[in-house]
Image (cartoon, coloured by chain):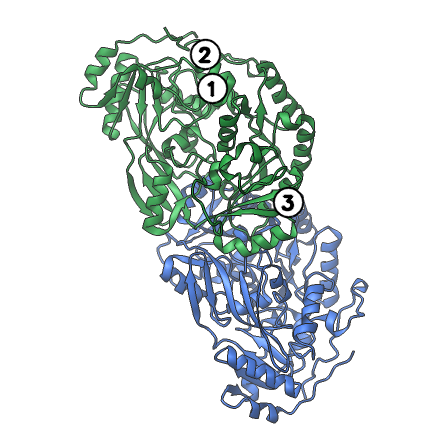
Chain colours: A blue, B green
Amino acid sequence: MARTFSFDLDALKRDLDGIELEDNPALVKQKSRDFFWYSPVLKRQLDDVTGDLVATPKDEDEVIRILAAAFKHDVPVTPRGAGTGNYGQAMPLSGGLILNLTAMNKVKAILPGRVIAEPGVIMAQLDRETRAHSGQELRLHPSTANTATIGGFIAGGSGGVGSIRWGGLRDLGNVIRLRVVTMEAAPRVLDLSGWELHKVMHAYGTNGIITEVEMPLTAAYDWVDVLVGFDDYMDSVRYADLLGNSDGLLLKEIATVAAPVPETYFLRHQKFIKMGQSLAILMVAPQSLDAFLALTEREKGDVIFRSDTASDLKGIPPNFELAWNHTTLRALRVDPAITYLQTMYAPPHHLEKIARMTALLGDEVPGHLEFVRFDGKITPMGLPMLRFTTEARLDEIVRLHEDNGCPVFNPHRYTLEEGGMKQTDAIQLAFKHEADPKGLLNPGKMIAFEDPDFDFAAQKTYLFPGLRVAS
Amino acid sequence: MARTFSFDLDALKRDLDGIELEDNPALVKQKSRDFFWYSPVLKRQLDDVTGDLVATPKDEDEVIRILAAAFKHDVPVTPRGAGTGNYGQAMPLSGGLILNLTAMNKVKAILPGRVIAEPGVIMAQLDRETRAHSGQELRLHPSTANTATIGGFIAGGSGGVGSIRWGGLRDLGNVIRLRVVTMEAAPRVLDLSGWELHKVMHAYGTNGIITEVEMPLTAAYDWVDVLVGFDDYMDSVRYADLLGNSDGLLLKEIATVAAPVPETYFLRHQKFIKMGQSLAILMVAPQSLDAFLALTEREKGDVIFRSDTASDLKGIPPNFELAWNHTTLRALRVDPAITYLQTMYAPPHHLEKIARMTALLGDEVPGHLEFVRFDGKITPMGLPMLRFTTEARLDEIVRLHEDNGCPVFNPHRYTLEEGGMKQTDAIQLAFKHEADPKGLLNPGKMIAFEDPDFDFAAQKTYLFPGLRVAS
């Protein structure tokens, strides 16, 4: 099913009279991009992608008007928060309309253990409001919390800071309710909760537009950023694993990064970092600090930085901006040849797997682990950096991981399936047919919809035939 | 080392002038008992145990005066909170002075994530104060929270409600600091934190008197009590295990109880309970309720009770008073021949172990599991009821568990070692020699101190030669 889209943009604009629009090509292109360029593969494939028009609705009624008009004129619609994704989630492969949701940024209600908000609110701002209101904060946020929107996180993210306690966004209970507008002649508004949430979560906005979110909150603390050094990377990994499994210690973030990444790429922290040390990157609750330090001392960890005692924090980013994909970002800024992978080392043999991959790949793939809860178990997820040479070698390294029992969630693919579970998500697909019968929402991202016969087992990269080449 | 204690009680009393004392034998005996009678073995051994005098200090200065005077006159001192223990923790085996700490019940400071309090405060009262102050509560409490003291819990307990999230009291971080007075001519006051806490935690007050506690707090919610029925006990166990491992669901309590315990012994809940059903006993955060119900429906659980929707809660105890040793208590009230065990079913083969023991012992040992975090893993701890016939059969059932890979923490023993780890705790023993050189604190509870040559491997029950027989 090759798909092309032709539409009358002027007719669409007329129908959107009164809604904030932008058609300056430079500005539209700016709003057509995300952090896809972390991947040299996606950079090659998507660098010319751009939409035709940006619409910025101020409320749900305007979203409904926009979707109805786009449906009528057969215009593709790609929703977008702050565009901090890494897989082209918010990039309009077939052009058309960018639905910029950042003006829908109101926090509507803060309750014990929950918050109701519009999708475009920046997560750090949301946390500021819930903290000020009642000492609460989101369970989970990405390392881009200072710029990313809550709606974008739900539609395009999977977990992050806080996952060491709460698991991932997909875990039942980490999103309470989503309000979603469908892409039909008369768009419907649906409130989804429980299992129904999986219809639209991490679906890149391919099957509905989120207009309201209800999220669980947890107690906010003045988290202490701590960096702990080890001369041997595997010692830092064992230490992080022990911390994660210490049930009485409250931490919000546990990551490890292998030398020489800290000394080479963590430029803001140079005055603290010792040559040759690998680091554990941690956020510790103040009430757990005594116990945490007792354990760290026993494990011979070298506490090189504590935000609660550092004499000068000027210019020092928070620890969570050393973690998750900010690790990669800091490396990329120094060495543009760096890219990354997303892997998993399932317990109980996670330490052996990490040691084996480290031995196999050495400094070509410098280690970076994020410890999270996964099905109840503390599990190191890998976000190793990768010194890119060729796409063939990249694919080879992916296969090396898979051959050694370490699944890869490939960040060098722009489709839902190739990045994630390598198969059709029947629930998302069924809802796509229901909520977006014309296939206008974020075209090209769900292979199961675009090409029902695609053979996932063949290990061929999917190329969306609707990808619009720049003229 | 046979020890007997002889002392001049009148001389002691003179030295305690101005401190609240009680020597009425009936009242002293009442304050010399705990819930040891859950065990027919301890009931036989300890039924006649009584002290000679109760002293009730109102502050730390009075504790110091009492200890100095008792040291001078060689009077054994057994500290006591509310006496809700089950192993004779607070029973004065050699008579002497009962140190009743319930008048030291002030909450001194409530801070973000922590509380500082005197040891005698009732835990439910502590939670009321921290809730009213800032929406916080203790991480852990026993099922006796409405009567038990925080100091008694730390000195004689191990975990309870909340352990599904935070593990046990012994886990580093679940107690922040303890202030302890030693038993010497001039008692010292020590502040212990980090690893030092293990010197005195769960030591039954054998090596120091706790005069102040600093505990971590967590966010308080209006926990919803839910009972979920299953026709097959193992289905309830698998469901509870799944709940515990669902990282996005916030629960404070997960227990399972096999039929016919609910229908026979949970008298206050009779109108909800269906014949033949085993139950999962749960406390669910309101913000997790939608997700919890979605999972419960998928698992075909029968929600027979919800405290948030029940029409009449009059006379209905909270769910935590169906759990932990309140399960046993409810059974005992109906059938005095009931006692219990404490076992553990370590993952990853926990479900098989539970199924095997259930098949082996059937209704002679009705199943009761408490799901907790243990070294990072969701682990079912057993508190099975046991239809007692003889001590020989009881010991046989203990051995049956051990032979099948299920360790038993024997609640039919009054010593630290026999109930717990079957070996000398070198840290507690060393601190006993330092803090209680005369061995006056709670004599007879620490075998390693009373009889350094005791052979733990011989599996013989320790009989304290200082046990004072009633005259």
Residue B281 lies in what quarter of the image? top right
| Residue A235 image point, x, y percent | 57, 44
Q: Which of B378 and B358 is in front in this view?
A: B358
Q: Where is residue B449 in the image (x, y as percent from the top left)?
A: 44, 16
Provide the secondary structure element on which disc 2 rests: loop
| Left or right relative to B168: residue A399 | right
Please name the residue that numbered disc 2 is placed on: B464
Q: Residues within 10 Å of mark 2 (few under 14, many from 20)?
A: many
Give the quadrant of residue A239. top right
Q: Which chain is home to disc 1?
A: B
Q: Residue B414 carries which label?
A: 1
Q: Which mark is residue A351?
A: 3
Q: Name the residue furthest front.
A: B271
- Contact (Cβ within 8 Å) of mark 2 with mark 1: yes
Residue found at x 43% / y 38%: B141
Q: Which of marks 2 and 3 is in front?
A: 2
Under tag 3, what secondary structure?
helix
Measure the C-alpha gap from mark 2 to mark 3.
47 Å
Q: Which amino acid does label 3 sit on?
A: Leu
Instruction: Please state which amino acid type lies under the numbered disc 1.
Output: Tyr
Q: Where is B110 relative to A203, above or below?
A: above
Dot 3 surroundings within 10 Å: few (below 14), some, or many (20 or more)?
A: some
**Residue at image x 50%, y 37%?**
B322
Q: Mark 3 lies on which chain?
A: A
Instruction: Give A64 or A272, whichever is nearer the viewer.
Output: A64
Q: Tell me whether circle 2 and circle 3 mark residues in contact (CB < 8 Å).
A: no
Which amino acid, mark 2? Phe
Q: In this view, does A149 lie above or below B113?
A: below
> How far, Cα to Cα, is label 1 from label 3?
41 Å
Marks 2 and 3 on same chain: no
Which image quarter is the C terminus of chain B in? top left
